[in-house]
Image (cartoon, helix red, strand yellow):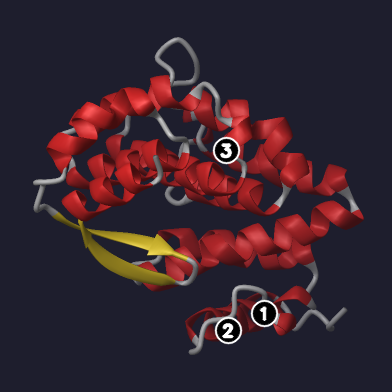
Amino acid sequence: MRQNPGGRKLKKRLEELLLQEPWEENNTELSQYPAKQSINALISFFCSLNPLLKWRAVSATGSVVSALSKISIEDARIIMRRLMWMLNEESGGIGWGVPEAMGEIMAQSRILAGEYNRIILSYLDESGNFIEHEPLQTGVLWALDRLAETWPDLLSQAPDLTRPYLNASDPEKRGLACLIAGHLHDKISRVRLEQLRHDDALISIYSHGYIREYHVGNLAEKALSHD
């Protein structure tokens, strides 16, 4: 393991690694820093005004915590509980980037996905831990799309919770709901997806290191192609 360069120096170096091109999802240098110190810096980037830095910090958090889970599953659980606390109103914060980080961690760790998938689902459940703040709802949808992409068998309850977002006024929510419906082969959504094929709203979605633009209609067509 690489010597910890200290708080500010570590944060600066991690920022350089996250913004370098070409992007490496499993950066060798990043994995050599002490996980607990790296996580502190990575979480601080969730509020960055640079969207690419924020999103790549989310990706890196998934890699770091997934690697940590193979060494100490309890230490990985502690980080997951820390993220959950950040979404709690009692934390005093908003929790920017936290649902996305939870989703990325679970996408990279089957064990943690099995343990926490119900938690991320509960954030869209009005009888559960429903999150009213709409930007965070978008983050939860992104997290569920990552889970649907990697571990669809764990999300049998997701369609009922995500299907309403196909009618959301926010096009980003509609687009993410399309992707989830496609990954989960949600046949009940098919009629609505057919309607959304003509949705020309342009949205930005992060995937595997890069932010790309899509028309919601294209995402609806992609979802329909999964059937």
Q: Amino acid at mark 2?
A: Leu
The label on residue 9 is: none
Contact? badges 1 and 2 (CB < 8 Å): yes
Q: Which residue is mark 1?
A: 27
Query: Tag 2: Cα neighbours inside 10 Å, few (<14), some, or many (≥20)?
Result: some
Q: Nearer the viewer, mark 3 or mark 1?
A: 3
Judged left or right of residue 3, residue 152 is left
Residue at the extreme bottom of the image, as rendered? 21
Q: Which residue is mark 2?
A: 17
Q: Amino acid at mark 3?
A: Pro
**Helix, strand or loop at disc 2?**
helix
Query: Tag 1: Cα neighbours inside 10 Å, few (<14), some, or many (≥20)?
Result: some
Can residue 90 be spotted in the picture? no
The label on residue 152 is: 3
Q: Nearer the viewer, mark 1 or mark 2?
A: 1
Q: Position of residue 151 (x, y in %)?
A: 62, 42
Q: Say which quarter of the image contains residue 82.
A: top right
Quadrant (top left/top right/bottom left/bottom right) for the N terminus: bottom right
Q: Earlier in the sequence, mark 1 or mark 2?
A: 2
Q: Residue at x 22, y 55 (%)?
A: 218
Q: Position of residue 45 (x, y in %)?
A: 49, 65
Q: Amino acid at mark 1?
A: Asn
Q: Nearer the viewer, mark 3 or mark 2?
A: 3
Q: Residue at x 33, y 59 (%)?
A: 205
Contact? badges 3 and 1 (CB < 8 Å): no
Q: Earlier in the sequence, mark 3 or mark 1?
A: 1
Above/below status of 55 relative to 151: below
